[in-house]
Amino acid sequence: MSRVLDALRMIWEIGWLRGLVVGFVTLTVVMLIAAFTIWFERKWSGRMQNRPGPTERGYGGWLQIFADFFKLLQKENLTPTATDRRLFDFVPPIVVFVVLSSLAVVPYVPQGPAADASVGVLLALAISSLMVFPVWAAGWSSNNKWALLGAMRAVAQSISYEIPLVLSALVPVILAGSFRLTEIVGAQADWHWFAFWPPGPGLAAFVLFYLSSLAEANRIPFDIPEAESELVAGATTEYGGMKFGMFYLGEYVHTFVASSLAALLFFGGWEGPGPDGLHWMLAKALILTASVIHVRWTLVRYRSDQLLRLCWTYFVPAALVLVFAAGLWRILAGGLA
Amino acid sequence: MVDAHPSHEPVAPALVEVSGLSLPAAITHLPRPDPYLNVEDYEPEADAMALNMGPQHPSTHGVLRLKLFLDGEICFKAVPYVGYLHRGVEKLLENRTAIQSVPYVDKNDYVSPLTGELALVMAYEALLDVEPPPRAQVLRTILMELQRIASHHLWLGTFCLDMGGALGGGSSVFLYNFRERELILDLLEALTGQRMHYNALMVGGNRHDVPPGWEEKVLATMDRVEDRLAEYEAMTVDNHIFRSRTVGVGVLDPLLALEAGAGGANLRASGVDHDLRRDAPYAAYGQVDVRIPVETAGDCYARFLVRIAEMREAIRIVRLLVSGIPEGPIGALKPPRHVNAVKLPPGEVYVGIESPRGELGTYLISDGSPIPVRVKIRPPSLHAVSLLPYLCVGATVSDIVVILGSLDPILGEVDR
């Protein structure tokens, strides 16, 4: 027994091996969270719509997601002949890679395994904005007009909404005076969560951040790139089996990561009543994810031109005003202190 | 964002007189796109993309195929292709006697089968000069209005589904609407034994008399449906996204609607006050004062408002009639001993009724044998689909889905 422990300790002391183990555990946990988010979404939307949702596999259907996963794995690896085959097959792993890699800089605990980069906010947003490339590549390589339309919409939307997203994330950065996510959380100690303090700009910035990340993650009411009633399935129309499964998983991981980022930036991260730690961070991120799901099953969607108009005529100016207000607060508060 | 369309406000719109009709001036004589536009003549031809929407597409309400010519995402030409669901119903009816025919027309407009039955049965009755007894007439009227509520419920659900997606808010409205539709189907099931293809009417009367306690059940269901209707209005009427997707989208010129033969809510939303229930009463519609909702904006939102108002009106008519169903027989003819027993007199006849989608007509020619020589069904949905080449031009793909949904075509009826 002690030999096993010794071996484990040795592994722990070797830096790259430790990174491998921690990374493996983190990614597994996050993917499990994403899987159970799917289950939760199916149950929750079922309750919203007077139906039970999955019931058969496991108690309350909680094993359904694994049944679906194995079903997708068993499906034929179908690639339509007219596609750009190499790009087409290359895209789904890229999606998963991009969404999971942003976890590298999103800390869930104060001294966590995630890299506490000095430009953590920028890095996390930059990585998640890379999603535009695989979605565009999927739409282009599919050689399908519906996929192309979906991909074009996705690119227009993601690029537009990146601006209010980054600008609204700048508000907590300015208030905290740091791009480092742990310092931003530290600045929100003693219940000075940026969503509520200073009153006004923080909450407004959170609303903007939330809506922009809905648009960035292509969720209703901004799910125009997918728009299954118009574009069949948008950029993922031609994908089936586990290739589609990767897009699907990526979507949920993306939502969860964006919710975690919102929890860090606006809701004090791991701060909370009682002992601080991972549980508060997870609770906040999961509540935000649940709210995304609730919104999804409540609203219908905008048209793409209305969506872009919303972005450029309301969100971007509002975000600029908020950045200005945050700077003003910082100067005044700094002057007072 | 899109502002409220001015003509949805409760002010009297300016009217213009066109060949004896007062039509709303704002939407009359709109410029009309050329539905036969040669794609090569289109100016930025290099950017044009032909896109086949359907016959397998989530929002084409069955198997309509729309060939769209897109410039970016704006459509500059739309060509509907119908016939994927053609079953040859008219030919089938030309080889069947009256009593054998009724189940076939159930499958035409499968969302509103009872109106299809009534249109056929009334044509045979006109040919045979048979008048159903008062009890049958009142029961038929109640059935038609119950069917109208059920049909509009399904329409509202699919309309929101088109707008919000199968995995989102649209499907919530869709499933809520099925909840009320089920209540009405329960009533129809109690009466006819079926939930979809009823075979409830026959020449000279009805096939089924009301079961005990049915009237009370109808009244209780109407209360519930009316309560829930307020919920749907709360979800849609003032919802910003719903309004911005429908207000000012797919504006239908009343003159174009009249020329294309469109009917029902599509026509009344464009300011044409026409409804066969009031203008040419049949069954027991003469006994009730049918109030016809009319809107003047002509867009998808106006069509939505008209259908919601029609549901309220249908509830009112059902309530009025169900408390005073006259006693008596439900059929004027003795049940025939075999299917060829009823000989049709020679002649021809056309009968039109107001289905939930507009004027549903049946044209019969008989040469004196038990089976008709020619049967022609005039489906309102076909005329609604014929509006698409005009309404889709200038719209985006997202709008086309909403426009198509707002016209409420049933492809089973279009293709027959």
Image: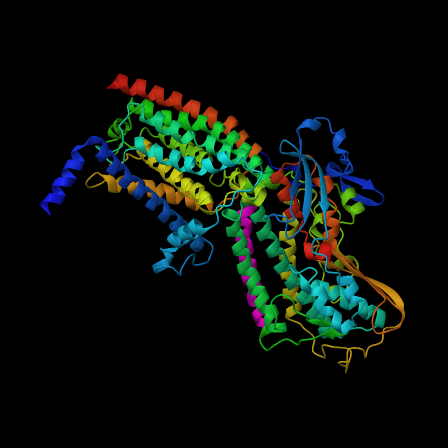
Magenta region, mostly helix, strand or loop? helix
Residue B216 magenta:
yes
Residue B133, given in percent of the width and then of the height, sits at: 76, 75
Answer with left or right where residue B48 lies relative to residue B217. Answer: right
Answer with left or right where residue B111 lies relative to residue A10. Answer: right
Instruction: Point out the stretch of residues depicted in magenta.
Output: B215-237
Up-down relation of residue B341 to residue B186 (above or below): below
Q: How is the image coloured?
A: rainbow
User: Number of labelled discs?
Assistant: 0
Residue B156 magenta:
no
Q: Does residue A213 show up?
A: yes
Residue B89, given in percent of the width and then of the height, sits at: 75, 62
Instruction: Looking at the picture, tell me which residue is in the foreground, B288 or A333.
Output: A333
Residue at the spot 82% in from the left edge and 73% down from the top edge: B130
Answer with left or right where residue B18 lies relative to residue A55. Answer: right
Instruction: Looking at the picture, tell me which residue is in the foreground, A280 or B311.
Output: A280
Q: Does residue A44 show up?
A: no
Q: Identify the image quadrant of residue B393.
A: top right
Residue at the spot 64% in from the left edge and 63% down from the top edge: B146
Up-down relation of residue B269 to residue A85 (above or below): below
Up-down relation of residue A306 to residue B232 (above or below): above
Q: Identify the image quadrant of residue B255.
A: top right
Q: Identify the image quadrant of residue A169.
A: top left
Quarter of the picture containing the C terminus of chain A is top left
- Kindly give the residue lying farthest to the left in the view shown: A2
Residue B267, given in percent of the width and then of the height, sits at: 73, 48
Instruction: Looking at the picture, tell me which residue is in the foreground, A244 or B305.
Output: A244
Residue A5, given in percent of the width and then of the height, sits at: 13, 43
Residue at the spot 59% in from the left edge and 34% down from the top edge: B2
